[in-house]
Amino acid sequence: MTQAVGLDWLLCTALPTGLVGRPHFVTVKTAVELYLPILVPVKKELVIMNKINKVAFSMVAICIAIQFVPYGRNHINPPIVHEPTWTNKKTRDLAKQVCFNCHSNETVWPWYSKIAPISWLVFSDVTEARQKLNFSDWTYGKRDGENSNKIRRDIETGEMPPIQYRLAHPEAKLDDSGRRALADGLEVTVKDSIKP
Ligand code: HEC
């Protein structure tokens, strides 16, 4: 397969070898031997980059497309109907600091709660949380969560506020004495606010 090649081949194969300008004939065999080890990995790399680009492009396209899903964008806070009879202001302040974003109609919606898919998670959490226990719409024991034992259990076991919320909201991390103060305060508040 050894054969002489023309000027084009000579120029393009000789360029990187520093042979331009010197009369030098390169054979196809030499050219293959010279460039194959370089070109094969380069081609593989290009194929991989191409795949990565395609995946990245699809992900960006999906992220843009899901912003048009209407679910999770209703951030209207319903009016405050009825609060429980708070034992003291400190208990309400603590509950507001740690629980109100989900369990009241005074939700402060952060900027990322407008971006899907986080908006879906935040919206479904707040909707479900309000159904179970809503400090702005107290129903005197009708809702599952209007129960001092459950409230104490959830605060003491660290189930409430949920871990993902605590990570995003440093103010919701209470130390032992804070948790005890909140559980004790809510226990009296809830007991005083349940119809016999
Ligand atoms: C990130 C939102 C969020 C925050 C903040 C939050 N909760 Fe909840 N809570 C929920 C959700 C969602 C549910 C319903 C699902 C469940 O029971 O896990 C719930 C349910 C509950 C229930 C009912 C549990 C049952 O067994 O019926 C209680 C009681 C409760 N939460 C107490 C609290 C208290 C007290 C705080 C503050 C210390 C708090 N939560 C903070 C989201 C939240």
Image (spheres, rainbow, N blue to C red):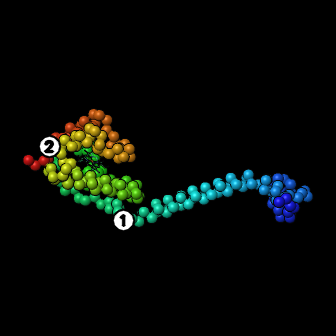
Q: Which residue is mark 1?
A: 70
Q: Is residue 51 left or right of residue 154?
A: right
- As drawn, the residue found furthest toward the front would be 1
- Can residue 29 be seen? yes
Q: Secondary structure at mark 2?
A: helix
| Amino acid type at image mark 1 | Pro
User: Which residue is rendered at x = 78% and y = 56% of the image?
Assistant: 32
| Amino acid type at image mark 2 | Lys
| Residue 167 rendering spot, x and y as whole percentages | 38, 44
| Residue 170 rendering spot, x and y as whole percentages | 37, 42
User: Which residue is rendered at x = 15% and y = 52% of the image?
Assistant: 142
Q: As displayed, is residue 70 above or below residue 105?
A: below
Q: Is residue 95 left or right of residue 22?
A: left
Viewer-nearest residue: 34 or 167 = 34
User: Which residue is rendered at x = 18% and y = 52% of the image?
Assistant: 143
Q: Which mark is residue 128?
A: none
- Can residue 169 be seen? no
| Local crowd size for mark 1, using a 10 Å CA cut-off: few (<14), some (14–19), many (≥20) | few
Q: Which mark is residue 191?
A: 2
Q: Quadrant of residue 126?
A: bottom left
